[in-house]
Image: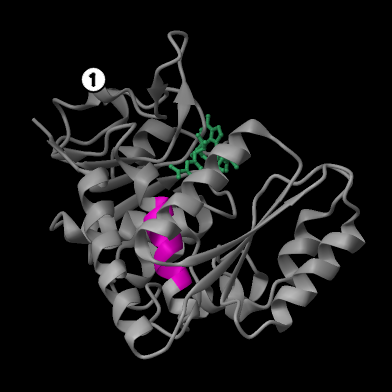
């Protein structure tokens, strides 16, 4: 029978710690400012941006909001990023993805100065993670490490399997688990005998993007299962990549959807913002 890993509670703890930290920084005359850029009016992006601004307000991070027209050219967006790169009062820059198809996302990600890259997507940030130097780490995998640590789950020496190899979840997740001294396997769409691979896992992180794909047949008795997926099912209810009710009796701990990984992503973004203003790197130390 599994313990439920409570992402809501742990993310709330992190936000409280950050709030205290920001208050202390303010007393020293340091202000934390995040610039948030959204191009177009994609409804899902608007919800994400709104949640990020709300979290900033709660913690005491000043947010600057840039809501640009869908037709904004790549040059205009790059010019805005350049201006924000040069502003001393702006610590972090976040460009909400996806961008309209006429804008090259990689070009935009590369334009953000690595010191302000609070999403951790810049090639320099990814490279630093790869070679073990402090830098910004992609928020979702960084949040998963915090979920595990703060739930008292040992990572060092464990067999960890990550399903998914995306740039924002699977790959940085594998690198972070490696940094925590786990033995790491990355499975993906071309992996053969997936069940045999996942059944080796003491810790299984699922970022496959397929609703309820992972059932108990994929899981070793007593494993810890982390579900990154977010989907809406036929009844418009949220569900993950893992069939929670099916795996629950088999594993020792599992993250629910909602209330697992999701809330951690924003908490870690806030943590990166505080770092960007001269705090510390959650990538290298627990917040
Ligand atoms: P993605 O589509 O970029 O990557 C999916 C990965 O799964 C790919 O690397 C692919 O190789 C692998 N895959 C696909 N089918 C497979 C199969 N049958 N067997 C094994 N591997 C297979 O997705 P992503 O951006 O990494 O996101 C994954 C999920 O996590 C999505 O549901 C997404 O919505 C969710 N997500 C949640 C958060 C959060 O904050 N909770 C953040 C990012 C993504």
Residue name at image x 35 percent, y 28 percent: 242
Range of residues picked out in magenta = 265-273
**At numbered mark 1, what does the secondary structure look like: helix, strand or loop?**
helix
Please tell me in which quadrant of the rendered image residue 128 appears.
bottom right
Mark 1, residue position: 245
Residue occupying the point 13% across, 25% down: 249
Residue in view at x 54 percent, y 68 percent: 118
Residue 190 shows in this picture: no
Residue 74: image x %, image y %? 88, 57
Residue 91 position in % (x across, y down)? 56, 77
Q: Observer-nearest residue: 49 or 6?
A: 49
Residue 263 image point, x, y percent = 36, 46
Q: Is residue 79 found inside the magenta-colored segment of the image?
A: no
* Residue occupying the far bottom of the picture: 28
Category of crowding for the residue at label 1, using alpha-carbon neighbours closer than 10 angstroms: few (below 14), some (14–19), many (at least 20): few
Indicate left or right for 246 with 263 as reference. Answer: left
Decide whether the magenta segment is chiefly helix, strand or loop. Answer: helix
Count numbered badges in the picture.
1
Outermost residue to the top:
235
């Amino acid at each position: 029978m599994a313990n439920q890993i409570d992402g809501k509670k742990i993310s709330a703890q992190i936000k409280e710690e950050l709030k205290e930290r920001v208050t202390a920084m303010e007393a020293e005359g340091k202000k934390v400012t995040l610039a948030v850029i959204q191009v177009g009016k994609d409804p899902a992006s608007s919800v994400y941006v709104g949640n990020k601004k709300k979290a900033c307000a709660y913690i005491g991070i000043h947010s600057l909001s840039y809501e640009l027209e869908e037709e904004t050219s790549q040059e205009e967006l790059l010019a805005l990023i350049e201006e924000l790169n040069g502003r001393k009062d702006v610590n972090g820059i976040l460009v909400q993805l996806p961008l309209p198809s006429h804008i090259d996302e990689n070009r935009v990600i590369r334009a953000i100065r690595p010191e302000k890259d609070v999403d951790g997507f810049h090639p320099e940030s990814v490279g630093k993670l790869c070679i073990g130097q402090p830098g910004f780490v992609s928020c979702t995998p960084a949040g998963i490490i915090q979920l595990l640590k703060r739930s008292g789950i040992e990572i060092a020496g464990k067999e960890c399997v990550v399903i998914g190899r995306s740039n924002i979840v699977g790959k940085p997740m594998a690198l972070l688990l490696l940094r925590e001294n786990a033995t790491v396997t990355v499975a993906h769409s071309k992996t053969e005998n997936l069940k045999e691979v996942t059944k080796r896992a003491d810790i299984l992180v699922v970022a496959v993007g397929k609703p309820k794909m992972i059932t108990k047949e994929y899981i070793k008795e007593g494993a810890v299962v982390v579900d990154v997926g977010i989907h809406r099912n036929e009844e418009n209810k949220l569900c993950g990549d893992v069939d929670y009710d099916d795996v629950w009796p088999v594993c020792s701990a599992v993250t629910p959807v909602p209330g697992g990984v999701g809330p951690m992503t924003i908490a870690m973004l806030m943590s990166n913002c505080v770092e960007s203003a001269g705090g510390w790197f959650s990538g290298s130390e627990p917040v």
